[in-house]
Amino acid sequence: MEFCEITKDLWSYLKEEKRPLVIYGTGDGADKIIDELEKRSLGSIISGIFASPGFVREGRVFRGFKVESFEEVCARVQDFIVLVAFGSPLPDVLSYVYSIEENYELYAPDVPVCGGEVFDMEFVRANETRLADVYSRLADDVSRRCFRAIVNYKLSGRLEYLRSCEVTPDEADSILGPFEKNCSFIDLGAYRGDTLLRFTKMFPVFSSATAVEPERHSFKKLTECAEGLSIPVNCVNALISDTCGTAMMTGSRGRGTRAAKPGTGHEITKVTVDSFDDSKTAGFIKFDVEGSELEALEGAKKTISDRKPQMKIACYHKSADLFGIPEKVFSIRNDYKIYMRHTPCIPGWDVDYYFL
């Protein structure tokens, strides 16, 4: 495969290796990785869990293991493999992980943020044609290098692949534009207003914006941010979807805020891009909606077809996003150029397609 050099995925390697595993991190990411290890009959080789300096508390237990410091694990376990089980883009956190990697065998397993199939060799072989088709359509060498690195990282868990394709946020977003005057910006997954502030500052041609954020605590911060901007901003506390109506939403904050399973969560309004007044003048849409990108695109079909806005779309929430998102966009309009960029983060989050 032109886009892949890995022939044995991390899970297969661990099954053959069988050295003790220590998990770095607690929480949702650790749960997902431990669940996957147990599913693959590898749970028995987990020998400990440790947390970052400052997060070790006396008597703290996670999944039946005492949460230790890294030094405590080193003193107790010999010749082990470290699995990073949390996500962060923070430079000091990344530096600490890299410092461990310098002296110990370390991997950051790729498990889907929003559930579904794991990106292993079986998944790649089953979807090789679809992945190859997207790879062939990428518009520049940087995108092709990024795509190869992300695929190889997802299979191997090796951080060298992520580091090989990192660019700064400014470098990534520099491929956007130019935009026509007085167009609008639609920010899907606006969080606390960080991207709203960033892109309205980068592109002063935007005459208005719509910012959508479902999580109520983040939404409050978003509205406060919007009040300080010089253009009118329509802040919407809702889930972006393929239809308007209502849905049940989880109670989590930040990454992972998404539609809940039936019978759980709380009710929230659903909206579509096509329902916004700003869709009629849309110049740019940012999609980062916790695994609901395909539904959001379906609800933006008219806007995309009529306006052909430039789009930045997160493609790391589900394994199938790497090919499913481009396929969806091209089914609506086939005349986009497609790019891929990755900004610093462990694990392989903060990967985006740009459609120009």
Image (cartoon, rainbow, N blue to C red):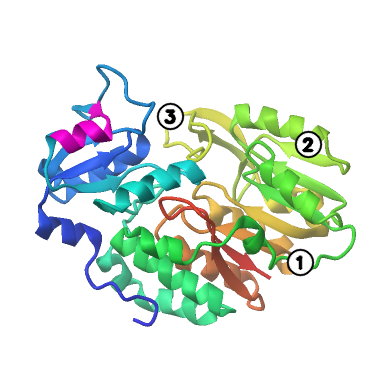
Residue 57 location, x and y as percent? Answer: 31, 20
Q: Amino acid at mark 3?
A: Thr
**Is 206 in front, or is 128?**
206
Predominant SS of the magenta segment: helix
Is 206 situated above or below 93? below
Q: Quadrant of the N terminus?
A: bottom left
Residue 153 location, x and y as percent? Answer: 36, 63
Secondary structure found at label 2: helix
| Magenta region | 67-75
- Write the residue at 56% across / 47% down: 289
Q: Quadrant location of residue 14?
A: bottom left
Q: Amino acid at mark 2?
A: Ala
Residue 149 location, x and y as percent? Answer: 42, 68
Q: Amino acid at mark 1?
A: Gly
Residue 353 location, x and y as percent? Answer: 57, 64
Report how far apart the C-alphas of labels 2 and 3 lie in the structure.
31 Å
In the picture of the structure, the residue carrying the numbered disc 3 is 264
- Write the residue at 33% across / 43% down: 85
